Image (spheres, rainbow, N blue to C red):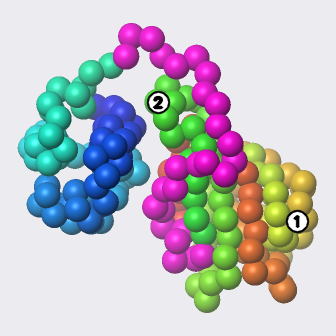
Amino acid sequence: MDLLRIAQLVRQTRKQQGMTVEALADKSGFSKTYVSRLENFRITPSIKSLSKMADALGIQMSAFFETSTEPTQYLTGHLDEGEEIERNGSKFGMKYHSLAFSKPDRKLNPFVIEYHRSDEKRGFLAHDSEEFFVLLEGELEFMVYDDDHCTSMKPQQTFYLSEGVPHRVQLAEGCDYAKALIVYSKEEAAIES
């Protein structure tokens, strides 16, 4: 089951029909949270769930399993046109924008992440992928392993992390907004440390 293809099809079809997440939730009988997690490829739906979703969207269930014989060879876009994805960082003042969401066979996962001031402090994370980080705007503090290993970052500075390295990022003192480009080497799964 290609979760990314299913997520893309649900989101694209919903948007083409001018439906909100809430409207699709009402129509399908699922919660808004379920629809959002499905669209952000965070859950694996059952066949019964896919059938209900297909009915709510007015499409054949087989559409979820059709594959293109020709993979997309290239994709164009813009840093400001990323597909916003709901992730657990929102409570920490973070917004994720996937830049290659529509390329299902990708080997890299690029995101633009916006950082806003938040009262919640995020713990250290480690990813199942390598990570390349470029600060585009604002100022950040990038901690690796613990709070004692802190690097202050300004725009155009980069960070490269190997797989499994615990780290966290926060806005620098006096900065209320920052924006970064992050590229993961594969679909990352964050592990709280």
Assess disc 1: are there few (<14), some (14-19) or many (≥20) residues with their C-alpha within 10 Å of its C-alpha. Answer: some
Helix, strand or loop under label 2? loop
Measured as percent of width and height from the top left, residue 51 is found at 11, 41
Number of on-image labels: 2
* Residue 164 visible from this viewpoint: no
Question: Residue drawn at (33%, 19%), measured in percent from left and top?
Answer: 67
Say left or right for 80 vs 57.
Answer: right
Residue tagged 1 = 153
* Residue 170 visible from this viewpoint: yes
Question: Residue drawn at (58%, 17%), measured in percent from left and top?
Answer: 73
Say left or right for 155 vs 123.
Answer: right
Q: Nearer the viewer's eye, disc 1 or disc 2?
A: 2
Position above or below: 188 against 106 = below
Q: Is residue 84 magenta?
A: yes
* Amino acid identity at mark 1: Met
Say whether marks 1 and 2 touch (CB < 8 Å).
no
Assess disc 2: are there few (<14), some (14-19) or many (≥20) residues with their C-alpha within 10 Å of its C-alpha. Answer: some
Q: Residue furthest top?
A: 69
Measured as percent of width and height from the top left, residue 180 is found at 74, 57
Which residue occupies the foreground of this view, 127 or 32? 32
Which residue occupies the foreground of this view, 114 or 169? 114
The part of the chain drawn in magenta is 68-93
What quarter of the picture does the N terminus occupy? top left
Precedes in sequence: disc 1 or disc 2: 2
Say left or right for 39 vs 54.
Answer: right
* Amino acid identity at mark 2: Pro
Q: Which mark is residue 104?
A: 2
Q: Which mark is residue 65?
A: none
Say left or right for 138 vs 37.
Answer: right
Between the C-alphas of marks 1 and 2, the distance is 32 Å
Measured as percent of width and height from the top left, residue 191 is found at 53, 59
Position above or below: 51 against 115 = above
